[in-house]
Every structure is written in structure tokens, then in C-alpha cells.
Image: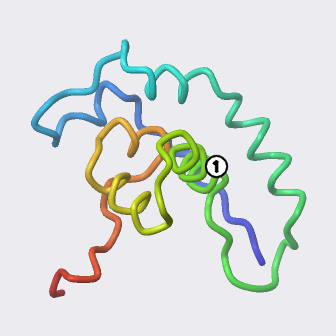
Amino acid sequence: MVYRHSPLQLPFESFGAGLSTPLSSNNEWVQLAEAMPWKALDEAYQLEFTKNAGRAAKPFRLLYGAILIQQRMGLTDRGVVAAIRDRGQWNIHTKSSGRIPNKNQKR
């Protein structure tokens, strides 16, 4: 697999702009996301991949964030995908745009 890093990170203040309720800096998920050493963890994760062969890997923050949410909330694989799609504070934690495709939605 190839790792392609995207350095863009939305600050949580601007992230909630499209949501009905803005994210609070007091939210435990926002605080946890801000406390993580994402850059150092991402750099260590990149060492596991080749530079130019294979499919692109998912970003470390997305993978780790999804697993953390799944474990803390006791969700199934499908449950964590739905939860990340539906909850703003989890979108920011996983650096997701919130646009996880819904398999039931017509394109």
C-alpha cells in the first residue's frame, strides 16, 4: 500500500459551520482529538508503507479515531460508520468531512 498524507486539518470551530449545533471546545471528543500527537503518530504509521506501489492507505487519524470510537462506545463495524457519519464531534475526531457514503442513498 501507498500512504498519501493530507496535511489539511479543519479547526473544530470552523468544522461545525454546516451543522445545526456548533462543536464546543468543552466536548470530550474534541478535547481528546486536540490532545493526541497526530503528527508523530502519522509519521510512525507512514513507515509501514512503500512510497510508490499499491492502493492508497486510509489516513491514520481516520483509522485510529474510528477504532477508538468503536471501542469506547461498544459499536459494531457498521455502527461506527453510521455514528461517525451522524455525529459532528466524531467527524472532527477522525478528520472526516462527515461525507461517508450511505449505501442506501441514490447517487
Q: Residue furthest front?
A: 74
Residue type, numbered disc 1: Tyr
Which image quarter holds the N terminus? bottom right
Question: Residue 63 falls in which quadrant of the image?
Answer: bottom right
**Residue lying at 61% horizontally and 21% vertically, measured from the top left:** 35
Q: Foreground residue, 44 or 6? A: 44
In percent of width and height, residue 96 lies at 42, 52
Q: Foreground residue, 42 or 52? A: 42
Vertical arrangement, residue 28 with respect to residue 52, above or below: above
Pointer 1 residue:
64
Q: Secondary structure under badge 1?
A: helix
Vertical arrangement, residue 21 with respect to residue 18, above or below: above
Question: Residue 12 falls in which quadrant of the image?
Answer: top left
> On the picture, is 57 further left or further right than 99?
right
> On the picture, is 79 further left or further right than 42?
left
**Residue lying at 81% horizontally and 53% vertically, measured from the top left:** 45
In percent of width and height, residue 69 lies at 51, 44
In percent of width and height, residue 37 lies at 71, 29
Vertical arrangement, residue 1 with respect to residue 77, above or below: below
